[in-house]
Image (spheres, helix red, strand yellow):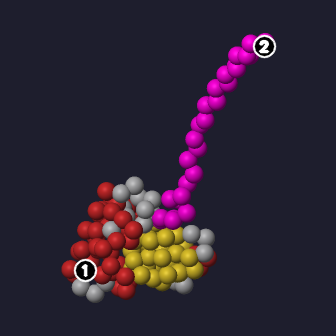
Amino acid sequence: MVIFAYQYLSMTQFVKSSFQENYPFITCLVSLETEYIGIVINFDHSVTSLYDYGSLRTQDEKDNFLLLGESWWWESNRKIPINIFLKQEMLPFKPYIKTFNSKDIKILFGPTVNLGNITEKRIKRKSIQLLKNPKKARP
């Protein structure tokens, strides 16, 4: 019995690693003992949104979804959500968005995107130069 559990664990790790190599933009999460696979739109402290790959109906939709995900992954800085980066292309997938309470989910693997990270402040260095004003000649 112990050997079977070890084989199952190693097989799961193998599937996970090969899946992440082929589709690094895909995230797997668990909510209420149900696994969901897709691309995370936004993950913050209260709400998580995901395009659910499992809800796609046809093979053409699935192929197009993976193609768009690959395009987003390699052509963007990965801080911008896919629905902002590929706005028009992602419109057909709007019915497949699932929203979760972030406290109720667990991310098993894959990347997450947070809109709050886009507005990171940049520190500007200011240089101050002091000049001595020459005294005006007194009459």
User: What is the CA distance from the residue labelled 1 to the residue labelled 2?
Assistant: 85 Å
Is residue 58 shown above or below 68? below
| Residue pointed to by mark 1 | 61
Residue lying at 24% horizontally and 85% vertically, measured from the top left: 58
Q: Give yes or no for residue 89 being in the magenta stretch.
A: no
> On screen, 65 above or below 78?
below
Give the number of the mark in front: 1 or 2. Answer: 2
In terms of depth relative to the viewer, which is nearer, 15 or 1?
15
Magenta span: helix, strand or loop, mainly? loop
Question: What's drawn in magenta, residue-wise?
Answer: 112-139
Residue at the image point whose x is 34% and y is 71% from the top: 87
Q: Where, by quadrant of the figure, is residue 51 drawn? A: bottom left
The three-letter code of the residue at mark 2 reads: Arg
- Find disc 2 in the rendering and name its residue: 138
In the image, taking residue 116 as reference, residue 9 lies left or right, namely left
- Comparing 104 with 82, the one in front is 82
Which kind of residue does numbered mark 1 sit on? Glu
- Residue 137, position as x, y percentages in the image: 74, 13
* Residue at position x 55%, y 63% in the image: 116
